[in-house]
Image: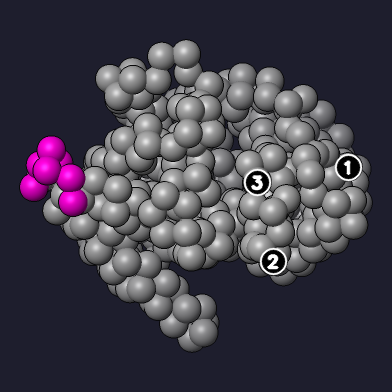
Amino acid sequence: MLATPLVFASAGLIPGLFSLFFCGAVAYYGLYLLSACAAEAPPGKASFFAVAQLTTPSLAVFFDAAIAIKCFGVSVSYLIIIKGLMPSVVQALHTISGSETPLPWILVSGRFWLAAFMLILIPLCFLRRMDSLRHMSYVALFTVVYLVIIVVVCYFDPPKGSAPPGEWHYFNMTPNFISTFPTLIFGFTCSQNLFPIYNELASNTQKRMNLVMQVSVASAGVAYLLVAMFGYLSFGDNVGANIIAMYPESSLFIALGQFAVVILVLFSHPMQVHPCRTCLDKVFDPKDPKAASENSAAEMSALKHTLLTWGIIILGFTIAYYVDDLQIVLSFVGSTGSVTISFILPGLFYYKLFGQRPETSRLQKWGSAGLFIYGVLVFIFCLSYNIWKVSTQ
């Protein structure tokens, strides 16, 4: 959500709106196909792994790798957000306090705060179960609403010291749109949550699942729309990859919003490490029956659990320490892991399970095939462009 205004800046207001609605609609279709596939899995055990076993068992390891990449990329983006926002929060509180004493340089260093917060994150990442962090969904909801309020209010009443806005355009297609477009795909990616919801619903009929998916995609779309549109109109072509970091460091109203985002991503980070570790367990040891079971997180050996967790933590910290551009990370994650689990896998699974059944309509059959092909094309085209862009910078 923080990077959606940059998508509009790279394409213009009208193409940005169209892309937002298009990505939401395609994401919903992918969720619909996955929900139909979930009904084919054993009761209460629906998962990517279970459906893969029904369709393409030999490729299950690659599907787990895609989920691991997506979760790892999200965890890195959270660390970059912490690094980028904490200096602004500290500077804002210092300004509001009225103190004339200069802040020590270390307190306005994003890398210091990244290292400091790792002291909190490391123990949380080693948890085998995330039950104790479930209440963070309320913090997430509050943060999203508060962020939307900040962006809308600051458009109508810009705070003192705001950066001068650049020009905004109805149409302004640029090559950078190829790099920013996967950010929208990333934003609507929630396929990894569909199977747990399906398993937990007492009444998981297709009609009930459709309602859950419609509410989820629509609510996310409204939040993205407000932040993207008003954020772009506020800063125009000068908008950055993190909209909340664009506002001046002189307002408690904004500082609280920035700190709320920090707290949110702080406790959301372990929730990405957990499934990443579980999927990597299957990738590195796919023949291990324990790794292949649905309860691999609990059955993983202590040594493997420790090595995988430290590997994820160290690699993620290293990338976040040296990379400042949030949009680059979101683009790579969006064009690889998000595309795979949102488009490629739903299309493939549905086609393999239902494509040859006489009751399946031609529209659904070829629609699932089209989603698969679309995902492959986006994967190849956007990933290639992102690699080229990074290599030429």
Compared with 351, 364 (above or below) is above
> Closer to the observer: label 3 or label 2?
3
In the image, what residue type sits under mark 2? Answer: Phe
Residue that appears at 30% across and 41% down: 33
Image position of 388 (left or right of 67): left
Q: Secondary structure at mark 1?
A: helix
Mark 1 vs mark 2: which is more N-terminal? 1
Compared with 162, 72 (above or below) is below
The structure's colour scheme is one colour
Comparing 232 with 348, the one in front is 348
Label 3 and label 1: CA atoms lie apart by 25 Å
> Closer to the observer: label 3 or label 1?
3
List x then y, in percent, for residue 194.
46, 34
List x then y, in percent, for residue 100.
86, 40
Comparing 280 with 268, the one in front is 280
Residue that appears at 58% across and 21% down: 142
The numbered mark at residue 293 is: 3
Instruction: Look at the image and say whether residue 216 sits in the magenta stretch.
Output: no
**Residue at numbered disc 1:** 123
Q: Is residue 237 visible?
A: no
> Closer to the observer: label 1 or label 2?
2
Image position of 90 (left or right of 326): right
**Residue at numbered disc 2:** 284
Comparing 124 with 299, the one in front is 299
In the image, what residue type sits under mark 3? Answer: Ser
Q: Which residues are magenta?
A: 356-362
List x then y, in percent, for residue 24.
30, 40
In the image, what residue type sits under mark 1? Answer: Pro
Magenta stretch, main secondary structure, is loop
